[in-house]
């Protein structure tokens, strides 16, 4: 019914529109809206509706459920980056008086604090927040924890209610106001709100065995709001996806966002399909790594995914409680776009200047007898990788003191330094106490434990 923007090829746009049409029809939802972001820019949107000749635009609000948690997590990480808290701090250091004060801020962000999944009393998503007037009503006394803290992933909506209260304590204002002032306004997301603002969709339940609908209540969940209160539009969510992909210095640095999307808790299966970082869900879809979040509230589902490797993001929203899966649709839109229009690699370009000392470090190095290759990247960065085919290496960031810090894989966070001999020549590389030399097991004074003085020999 709608198919906007001309940034994608016609065949791609047709495939995306077909996919959303199938999702709306087979999912039996009154309406669906979706959008695709490429390299930080909205390049396609589409919508389908039960009403002939009409479909919602990217400016119509839908409830986004637990995607709200990504906004709360960004507020918490801002507090950390400002030095107002440490992720290892116990909650009681900043928010005293709760029955789970020993749980850390990081554990609350990553759902590893062992807290109960839901708040006590009537179904919080369908009832007014006045039923939970204070934090004491968010967790059931004596049943606050279901698992030892830090031991496993266990999704907890009350955990994010506590994070919202933490934000309010440290900012001295309601979390929603802090969100508007610190995040939404700088990013131009003026259609993301705590309560619905016209135009917005109504939420419905669709009967499982008949094509009839039932309106769902539109509630203000009060203290549980940080777990899933927000309303937003696909246009605003596209801006949010672009922010999660690249960061914005006005809100949160790209390095902090990268920290948020690293797995915080180990998975329980070897063939993992999902994990969780600091406020971001992680998904493995057919070898494609996605991060973002899914959301649902009575009458609505939502999904937002980013594929860093493809330079793509997609969002989707629907106004039915069940049936249509906006989160699956968002992942499918990324796959379809990537398959129809795979990302073009950046052109190879030489470095702007040559540093002779760094250039002299490149080439083969040996950890014991295991060959490695050191390559020079831009900004004085280095890549060190085993020469064995298929082996994974590590990237290193240059530091002002002349060392390098590992960015990924085994050496993430470890320090690489050049060790020089008395005459100033390079003796070896020291990487977290591992010694790399220019030849296998040589020279003796560089290799811990020395080298047999008779050297290599035959049998």
Image (spheres, rainbow, N blue to C red):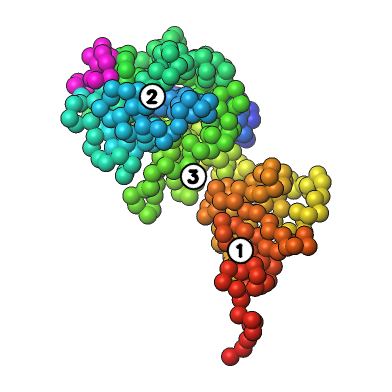
Q: CA separation, marks 1 and 3?
A: 34 Å
Q: Earlier in the sequence, mark 1 or mark 3?
A: 3
Instruction: Measuring from the top left, give residue 36's x and y in whole percent.
Output: 54, 31
| In this rendering, position of residue 93 left or right of residue 46 | left
| In this rendering, position of residue 321 left or right of residue 195 | left
In the rendered image, the vertical position of residue 106 relative to residue 194, given as above or below: below
- Residue wearing tag 2: 94
Instruction: Measuring from the top left, give residue 274's x and y in whole percent.
Output: 39, 43
Instruction: Measuring from the top left, give residue 193's x and y in whole percent.
Output: 44, 14
- Residue wearing tag 1: 435
Residue drawn 33% across the image and 41% down it: 150
Q: Earlier in the sequence, mark 3 or mark 2?
A: 2
Does the magenta run of residues contain 34?
no
> What secondary structure is marked by label 2?
loop
Question: Mark 2, residues whose alpha carbon is within 10 Å: few (<14), some, or many (≥20)?
Answer: some
- Residue wearing tag 3: 289
- Which image quadrant is residue 356 in? bottom right
The residue mark sitting in front, 1 or 3, is 1
Residue range highlighted in magenta: 121-137
**Can residue 392 be seen from the camera position used here?**
yes
The residue mark sitting in front, 3 or 2, is 2
- Which image quadrant is residue 49 in? top left
Residue drawn 75% across the image and 54% down it: 358
């Amino acid at each position: 019914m709608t198919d906007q923007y001309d940034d994608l090829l016609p065949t791609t746009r047709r495939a995306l529109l077909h996919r959303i049409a199938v999702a709306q029809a087979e999912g039996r939802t009154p309406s669906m809206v979706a959008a695709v972001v490429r390299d930080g820019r909205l390049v396609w949107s589409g919508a389908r509706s039960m009403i002939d000749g009409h479909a919602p635009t990217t400016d119509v609000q839908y409830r986004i459920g637990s995607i709200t948690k990504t906004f709360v997590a960004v507020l918490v990480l801002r507090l950390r980056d400002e030095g107002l808290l440490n992720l290892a701090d116990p909650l009681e250091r900043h928010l005293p008086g709760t029955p789970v004060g020993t749980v850390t801020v990081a554990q609350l962000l990553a759902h590893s604090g062992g807290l109960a999944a839901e708040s006590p009393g009537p179904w919080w998503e369908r009832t007014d927040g006045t039923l939970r007037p204070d934090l004491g009503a968010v967790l059931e006394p004596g049943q606050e924890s279901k698992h030892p803290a830090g031991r496993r992933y266990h999704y907890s909506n009350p955990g994010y209610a506590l994070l919202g209260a933490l934000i309010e304590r440290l900012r001295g204002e309601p979390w929603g106001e802090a969100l508007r002032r610190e995040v939404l306004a700088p990013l131009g997301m003026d259609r993301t709100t705590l309560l619905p603002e016209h135009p917005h969709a109504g939420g419905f339940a669709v009967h499982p065995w008949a094509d009839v609908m039932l309106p769902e209540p539109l509630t203000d969940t009060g203290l549980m709001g940080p777990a899933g209160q927000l309303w937003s539009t696909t246009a605003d969510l596209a801006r949010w996806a672009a922010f999660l992909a690249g960061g914005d210095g006005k809100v949160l640095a790209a390095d902090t966002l990268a920290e948020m999307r690293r797995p915080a808790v180990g998975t329980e299966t070897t063939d993992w399909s999902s994990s969780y970082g600091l406020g971001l869900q992680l998904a493995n879809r057919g070898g494609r790594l996605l991060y973002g979040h899914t959301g649902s509230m009575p009458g609505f589902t939502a999904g937002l995914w980013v594929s860093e490797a493809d330079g793509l993001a997609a969002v989707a929203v629907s106004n039915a409680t069940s049936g249509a899966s906006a989160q699956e649709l968002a992942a499918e839109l990324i796959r379809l776009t990537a398959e129809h229009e795979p990302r073009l690699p950046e052109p190879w370009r030489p470095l702007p200047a040559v540093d002779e000392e760094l250039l002299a470090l490149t080439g083969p190095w040996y950890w014991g007898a295991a060959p490695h290759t050191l390559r020079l990247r831009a900004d004085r960065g280095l890549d060190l990788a085993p020469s064995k085919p298929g082996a994974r290496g590590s990237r290193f960031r240059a530091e002002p003191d002349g060392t390098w810090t590992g960015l990924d894989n085994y050496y993430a966070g470890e320090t690489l330094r050049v060790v020089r001999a008395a005459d100033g020549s390079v003796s070896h590389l020291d990487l977290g106490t591992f010694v790399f030399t220019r030849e296998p097991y040589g020279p003796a004074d560089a290799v811990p434990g020395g080298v047999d003085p008779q050297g290599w020999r035959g049998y």
